Image (cartoon, coloured by chain):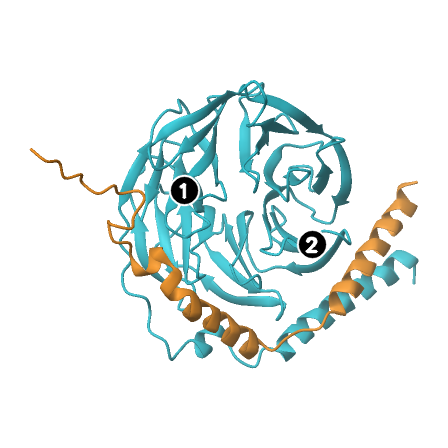
């Protein structure tokens, strides 16, 4: 038998081993475990604020840790930092490239980042000495579009790219600290664990991967989706991973059990999931879809308990404030809406 | 040569699979119970779940009373 053939056999055998090991711990389903609790009562959120100002499709939004400011990115070529309480624009940052796909707010509140079809992640300092917001660093090395970025601190950021890799950058030196390779499709989204030790990535190879940031290794791979994973996030408990896909479903995987626990789907939903965010207790999952709506799911019972209807085009991004007070949706209709 | 780089790539895949196969797994019943407990314990601190009164809602300023 040739070496290649031997390796293929070994790979198949290992895949079977993993499947068997997962089955072995599947002594119950989440459905059965949650049989005793009742579905949450209907969640009716209202639009409290509409943030108007972008002139084109909004592709991303990210809350600041203060739960008041948020940054949004639009293909009108602007990053806008909003005071969501007053709807005032704190900063309107013109971008070199208008083809932006993602943005992120640093936990400190000092920096914001964005990137897109320019294949770069640009870091902006909001607290510069003369009050002007300027590009602080341009992180260039990806050979594909920047789909997502998340700050670990003012000195480190993680990016995901259409070149199938994720990268941990040293912002000071502008260099790559670690390249996380393994996906065989465009990486579309990433989420950092609450303890900042791990991150998860969702890709067009239909899988989600859990990475150890310091070790630089892929710990686990979660399959099951039947199309591109567009959105991914951690549940606040740090063990649950939620994914949203073009296959019109969202799934929840558990890291410790190394498998899918439940799927959020409905035969009436036939369009892709673009974005998702958990509520602060993890009980609600808000998911944005291509059909202009956002569905609210009871995470334990997998039932739809609410809808956010109000946008006139695709909901492209969604985020819940760190204090859990409100959700923000961003849309191709150029508006952001704050709900609670 | 593309032949040997394919083998190298395959070796990496096998190595990664070995690593992923070796992790310890917790029973689903345990994972499910812990998840439920987390949700229930934090339910009261989840404004989207419990609702927000207008007096505590930063997005819904109270109507100001003015002396005429």
Residue A240: percent from left, percent from top: 55, 62
Residue A262: percent from left, percent from top: 49, 66
The residue at which mark 2 appears reads as: A211
Chain A is shown in which shade? cyan
The residue tagged with tag 2: helix, strand or loop?
A: strand
Chain B is shown in which shade? orange
Task: Give me the chain letter of mark 2.
Answer: A
Q: Is residue B35 above or below residue A159?
A: below
The image quadrant where one finds the N terminus of chain A is bottom right
Identify which residue is drawn at 71% across, 28% down. Answer: A140
Task: State the CA–CA distance, disc 1 to disc 2.
Answer: 29 Å
**Left or right of B5 on screen, residue B66:** left
The residue tagged with tag 1: helix, strand or loop?
A: loop
Say which of A110 and A168 sits in front: A110
Location of residue A150 (image quadrant)? top right
Say which of A119 and A126 sits in front: A126
Q: Is residue A147 above or below residue A124?
A: below
Identify which residue is drawn at 39% across, 68% down. Answer: A301
Say which of A190 and B45 sits in front: B45
The residue at which mark 1 appears reads as: A290
Location of residue B16 (image quadrant)? bottom right
| Furthest-left residue in this view | B68
Say which of A227 and A211 sits in front: A211
């Amino acid at each position: 038998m040739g070496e290649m053939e031997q390796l293929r056999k070994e790979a198949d055998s290992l895949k079977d081993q993993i499947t068997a090991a997962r089955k072995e711990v599947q002594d119950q389903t989440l459905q059965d475990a949650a049989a005793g609790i009742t579905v949450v009562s209907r969640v009716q959120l209202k639009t409290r604020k509409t943030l108007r100002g972008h002139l084109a499709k909004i592709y991303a939004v990210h809350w600041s840790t203060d739960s008041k400011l948020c940054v949004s990115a639009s293909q009108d070529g602007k990053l806008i930092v909003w005071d969501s309480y007053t709807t005032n624009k704190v900063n309107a940052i013109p971008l070199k490239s208008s083809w932006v796909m993602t943005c992120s707010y640093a936990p400190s509140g000092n920096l914001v980042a964005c990137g897109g079809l320019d294949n770069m992640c640009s870091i902006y300092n909001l607290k510069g000495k003369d009050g002007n917001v300027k590009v602080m660093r341009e992180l260039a090395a990806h050979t594909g579009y920047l789909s997502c970025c998340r700050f670990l601190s003012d000195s480190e950021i993680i990016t995901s790219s259409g070149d199938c890799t994720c990268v941990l950058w040293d912002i000071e030196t502008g260099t790559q600290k670690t390249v996380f390779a393994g996906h065989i499709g465009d990486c579309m989204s990433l989420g950092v664990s609450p303890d900042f030790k791990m991150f998860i990535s969702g890709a067009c190879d239909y899988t989600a991967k859990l990475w150890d940031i310091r070790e630089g290794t892929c710990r686990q791979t979660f399959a099951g989706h039947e199309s591109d994973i567009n959105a991914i996030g951690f549940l606040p408990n740090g063990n649950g991973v939620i994914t949203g896909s073009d296959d019109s479903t969202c799934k929840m995987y558990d890291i410790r059990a190394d498998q899918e626990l439940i799927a959020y789907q409905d035969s009436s939903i036939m369009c892709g999931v673009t974005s998702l965010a958990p509520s602060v207790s993890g009980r609600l999952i808000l998911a944005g879809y291509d059909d202009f709506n956002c569905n609210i799911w009871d995470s334990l019972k997998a039932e739809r308990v609410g809808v956010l209807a109000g946008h006139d085009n695709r909901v492209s991004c969604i985020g819940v404030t760190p204090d859990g007070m409100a959700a923000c949706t961003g849309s191709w209709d150029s508006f952001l809406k704050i709900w609670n | 040569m593309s032949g040997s780089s394919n083998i190298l790539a395959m070796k990496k895949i096998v190595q990664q699979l070995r690593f992923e196969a070796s992790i310890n797994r917790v029973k689903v019943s345990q994972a499910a119970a812990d998840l439920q407990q987390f949700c229930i314990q934090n339910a009261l601190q989840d404004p989207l779940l419990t609702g927000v009164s207008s007096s505590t809602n930063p997005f819904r300023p109270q109507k100001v009373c003015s002396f005429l």
